[in-house]
Amino acid sequence: MPHRVLIKPSNHTFTVDDNETVLDAALREGFPLPYGCRDGACGTCKGKLLEGRVDFGSYQDSALTGDDRSAGFALFCQARPLTDLVIESREIGAIKDIPVKTLPCRVQKMERVAPDVMVLHLQLPAHERLQFLAGQYLDILMKDGKRRSFSMANGPHDDHLLQLHVRNYGRGGFTEYVFSRMKEKDILRFEGPLGTFFLREDSDKPIVFLASGTGFAPIKAIVEYAFHKGIERKMVLYWGNRSLADFYLREVPGKWQQEHSNFAFVPVLSEPAPEDRWNGRTGLVHQAVMQDFDSLAGYQVYACGAPVMVEAAHRDFTRLKGLPESEFYSDAFTISRDTHIPRKSGP
């Protein structure tokens, strides 16, 4: 039977139908709760159960620990009400009026920017336009009913073509198709925009961007949008990869640094090869931030990439560097448990 949910502190209410998750029902009724992977893996949708009971669903322990459950938290992308609920969750007003569409698109251009990274440029039908926020993602809809999620690497100010950064995992599926059989002019279908990873423009705090692998894609969109809008907040990007060959499009943030006095770029390699002759920063990318900042209390952090990086950054920045929980925004490129390989374009 349907159950009623009351959101605190907004006091908005909505109804969850049978076999529907709290998040799906909230989005359906126009109340955008925070979310990312929708697979119970990233933890972005975590909120508190103030009253009522839920079926917690299937999730990864790193996203919802035993201590989280004991403290009354649930992942709303997985939780299904067993009773009426009162929940505590912030709502994302900026995406409330942006429609999610299902559209065809044409592969206009394919650029192999690294041995295992392809940049796809997708063209919408002439009569269609996608409204979205820089940093959001879309789901490619496969013929077998599966989905592949990819962040858009362009901002809405530059929407002639949608840009995706796709890493080849070598395990079949969509990425294998991209690297072995996809051709320019192929037709795809997608659903979007999705996600709540985007720039909070109501703040004037300086920003630390943190990316691993192709987690650079949505951050590229956000940074370029900030430049387009003339946002003067101080910004620094820490981008981590294993070796120099993994730094696809490295010239792009390098150019940003040259052209914008409020932007700095710190590349970090975790396993530089001898032939890289690397004299720059080494180690884990979030640890480079830890070394450079005595405190993050007055900052916003936007982190995107491997879940282990995002989780470590959230833990260490909030516990050790004074970053407020509310100022950490993330998009973890997760691995789906049973449907496909990359939940996002992944590091």
Image (spheres, rainbow, N blue to C red):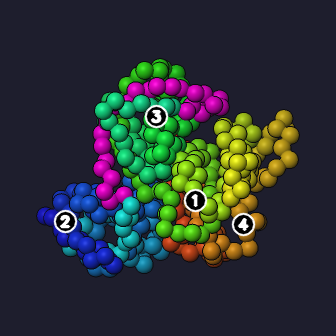
Along the viewing direction, whichever of 138 and 206 lies nearer the viewer: 206
Instruction: Calculate the distance from the C-alpha at mark 3 to the C-alpha at mark 2.
Output: 37 Å
Tell me the crowding category of disc 4: few under 14, some 14 to 19, or many 20 or more residues within 10 angstroms, Cα based.
some
Q: Quadrant of residue 50?
A: bottom left
Identify the amino acid type marked 2: Thr
Tag 1 residue: 231
Q: Are marks 2 and 4 in contact (CB under 8 Å)?
A: no
Q: Mark 3 or mark 4: which comes first in sequence?
A: 3
Q: Residue at 62% x, 52% y: name it.
A: 211
Tag 3 residue: 161
Q: Residue at 73% x, 69% y: name it.
A: 293
Along the viewing direction, whichever of 181 and 144 lies nearer the viewer: 181
Along the viewing direction, whichever of 201 and 147 lies nearer the viewer: 201
Identify the amino acid type marked 1: Ile
| Front of the two marks 2 and 1 | 1
Element class at badge 4: helix
Q: Residue at 42% x, 77% y: name it.
A: 70
Element class at badge 2: strand
Residue 24 percent coordinates (x, y): 28, 57
Tell me the crowding category of disc 1: few under 14, some 14 to 19, or many 20 or more residues within 10 angstroms, Cα based.
some
Residue 290 is labelled as: 4
